[in-house]
């Protein structure tokens, strides 16, 4: 997700939401961000969109969820972001992002964020077998080198699903806030 400017006193944050079981609980993060006076917009991967209650999230944020590119001349439905949180971030998204692959709107925004100086935090959500893959570890290292703030999620057991217990949604905000406070 990415912080979206639109309210004078609020930082704007955009959330990039990926296809993971915990994505259905993203409202918890939106609530936490709004309690901290952040204006929130949501961008979902095409697969992640299927995990979300679109109506509820759009009602909560006041913005449409984006998952596809705009057509030429189409108005921007979200304000510009001051920060981005990628929560939950799947194995696929982390690896594509680190490789500079921009085949979805969410990945396109993430790939541009570095060049635009937008603080970005990621909370990975994957199983231990995926986390053991050397490409994943290299991808996290590459993202760290570009200044991406990486959360502390412990991978869950393979073939067991992760559940949302122990997933620290607010960690994304905690990681980003020190990078935004000078602007407030």
Image (spheres, grey):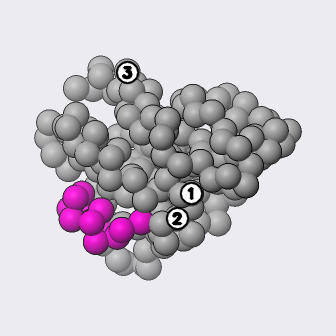
The dot on residue 148 is none
Q: Is residue 113 left or right of residue 156?
A: left
Disc 1 or disc 3, which is closer to the eye? 1
Q: CA distance from mark 3 to mark 2?
A: 28 Å
Residue 27 among magenta residues: no
Magenta-tinted stretch: 52-64
Residue 54: x percent and y percent? 34, 70
Q: CA distance from mark 1 to mark 2?
A: 7 Å
**Secondary structure of the magenta portion, mostly?**
helix
Who is closer to the viewer here, 124 or 2? 124
Query: Residue placed at 57% from the left, 69% from the top?
Result: 47
State the SS at label 2: helix
Q: Which residue is mark 2?
A: 48
Query: Would you identify the image quadrant in which residue 34 lies?
Result: top left
Disc 3 or disc 2, which is closer to the eye? 2
Residue 38: x percent and y percent? 24, 41
Q: Which residue is mark 3?
A: 178
Residue 156: x percent and y percent? 66, 42
Q: Quadrant of the C terminus?
A: top left
| CA neighbours of label 2 inside 10 A, class few (<14), some (14 to 19), many (20+) | many
Q: Which residue is mark 1?
A: 20
Q: CA distance from mark 1 to mark 3?
A: 27 Å
Query: Residue placed at 45% from the left, 35% from the top?
Result: 168
Label 1 vs 2, first from the N-terminus: 1
Cβ–Cβ under 8 Å for marks 1 and 2: yes
């Amino acid at each position: 997700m990415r912080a979206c400017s639109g309210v004078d006193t609020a930082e704007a944050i955009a959330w990039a939401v990926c296809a993971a079981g915990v994505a259905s609980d993203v409202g918890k993060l939106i609530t936490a961000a709004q309690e901290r006076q952040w204006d929130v917009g949501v961008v979902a991967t095409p697969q992640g969109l299927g995990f979300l209650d679109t109506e509820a999230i759009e009602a909560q944020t006041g913005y449409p969820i984006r998952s596809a590119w705009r057509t030429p001349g189409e108005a921007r439905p979200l304000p510009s972001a001051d920060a981005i949180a990628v929560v939950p971030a799947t194995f696929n998204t982390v690896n594509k992002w680190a490789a500079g692959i921009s085949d979805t709107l969410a990945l396109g925004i993430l790939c541009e964020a570095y060049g635009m100086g937008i603080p970005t935090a990621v909370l990975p959500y994957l199983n231990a077998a995926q986390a053991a893959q050397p490409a994943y570890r290299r991808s996290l290292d590459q993202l760290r080198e570009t200044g991406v703030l990486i959360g502390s999620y412990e991978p869950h057991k393979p073939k067991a699903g992760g559940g949302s217990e122990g997933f620290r949604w607010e960690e994304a905000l905690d990681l980003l806030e020190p990078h935004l406070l000078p602007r407030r």
